[in-house]
Amino acid sequence: MDKQYYPALDETLCRATLPNGLRVLVVPKQGFTKKLAYFVTDFGAVHTDFSLDGEKITVPAGVAHYLEHKIFDLPGRDVSAEFAAMGAMVNAFTSYDLTAYYFSCTENFEDCLDLLLEFVSTPYFTEESVEKERGIIDQEIGMVADEPGSRVFENLMTAMYRSHPIRIPILGTSQTIRDITPEILHTCHRAFYHPGNMLLCVVGDVDPEVVCAQACRILGDAAGNMGQKAPFPEEPTSCPESAVTAQMDIAMPMFSMGFKCPPIDKGEAAIRREFIGDLAAEVLFGEASALYLQLYAEGVIDSSFGGGYETIDGCALLNCGGDSQYPEKVRDAILAEAAGICQNGIPQDTFLRLKRSAMGRRIRDLDSFDSTCFRLCAYEMTEFDYFRFPELYGDIEAEEVCQFIRQVVRPEGCSLSIIYPIKEENP
């Protein structure tokens, strides 16, 4: 197992690829009682088109999340109760581009890891259980639709993208989940829950060699065929709609705004572009930026406002939002600030201050085991060693950020999603 020390972060990372293709990352934390393990597949809500064994396959929207629910089923067993009996907490989540299963514990780590690897790698889908889950997930879809924060972002995605599957909510819709069957779940599990498409990440006071040995014992050594994701349809740089509105039972208007960015690929060059986008967000509307302070002082935004650079497989965007009586003023102010930066550049002292602020937040995030695990997994899927982020941040120049803003922060690439209170008329 390879072992590397990162002096800028005072972190050590142990890395291995097993004969079955599983990538294993271990961050040793000597003396800590908490241990955390993530078992992640490179399969999320947007991956509805793929090929397997030479056959092209399209599955219903929401299948990745549906599969996450059903993975916890083992015949005659209650996986959550077994973890609880060992003093562990187990959970899972599905995002647009990955699905993660994880547990945390202070004791019985090896037994918990065995159970995690076992239940995630064991497909068990019956007609009865799949049908029963449909009603549960349909209720969840309704709950999310009633949540303003989710609704405002999902509306933004439909306004920004013409054909990318990010237009469809992660959970799918009440209509699409009706078409999910045990056979479809088995197909997706066979395509994407193979060790070669997965990653195991552990943070805690553990023996990395023992972690690898456990993974080999539970998952076996055999390689095998995996699903091949279909390329996403090309998107123009402009947005189909410049604004979209809705009404919900909220106290004041809520908005989410996006600037469409070219999708990034994988590897260091792509991640460097992501970090440039991250700094562009910091310069334009980060908490330490001049525009944020101005808008806050004027009462245009409040403490709910925030944003950053978002990447999802096949698309990327600068995104910000929060509560505001004046969403259009926020949009116009950001466009004006971008125009000023394009004309005058970024003062070097301002740029260095904001860069230190952005990098400092990432360093502080490593104090959290959960954040460390998630970021290591997400960036490993894009073929980048996340612990190298200080190196990439350090090399980025102000002019690169200016150039990014020139290319991205334009009216035709911007869309604004607003939810108004039901009793308030749209301006």
Image (cartoon, helix red, strand yellow):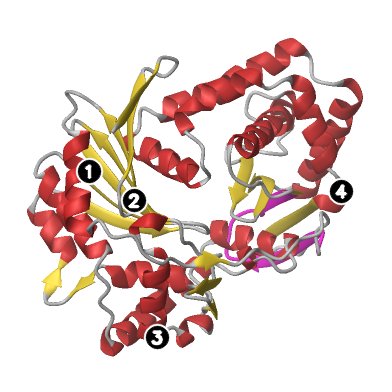
Q: Which residues are magenta?
A: 241-259
Secondary structure at badge 3 equals loop
Q: Nearer the viewer, mark 2 or mark 3?
A: 2
Q: Where does the C terminus fall, quadrant-wise?
A: bottom right
**Residue 411's disc number:** 4
Q: Earlier in the sequence, mark 1 or mark 3?
A: 3
Secondary structure at badge 2 equals loop
Q: Amino acid at mark 2?
A: Leu
Q: Amino acid at mark 4?
A: Pro
Q: Earlier in the sequence, mark 1 or mark 2?
A: 2
> What residue is pinned by disc 1?
212
Secondary structure at badge 1 equals helix
Measured Cα–Cα span from mark 2 to mark 4:
44 Å
Measured Cα–Cα span from mark 2 to mark 3:
28 Å
Q: Is residue 421 visible?
A: no
> What residue is pinned by disc 3?
181
| Relative horizontal placement of residue 163, taking residue 240 as reference (left or right) | left
> What residue is pinned by disc 2?
22
| The quadrant where residue 230 appears | bottom right
Tell me which residue sits at (68%, 39%) in the image.
Answer: 301
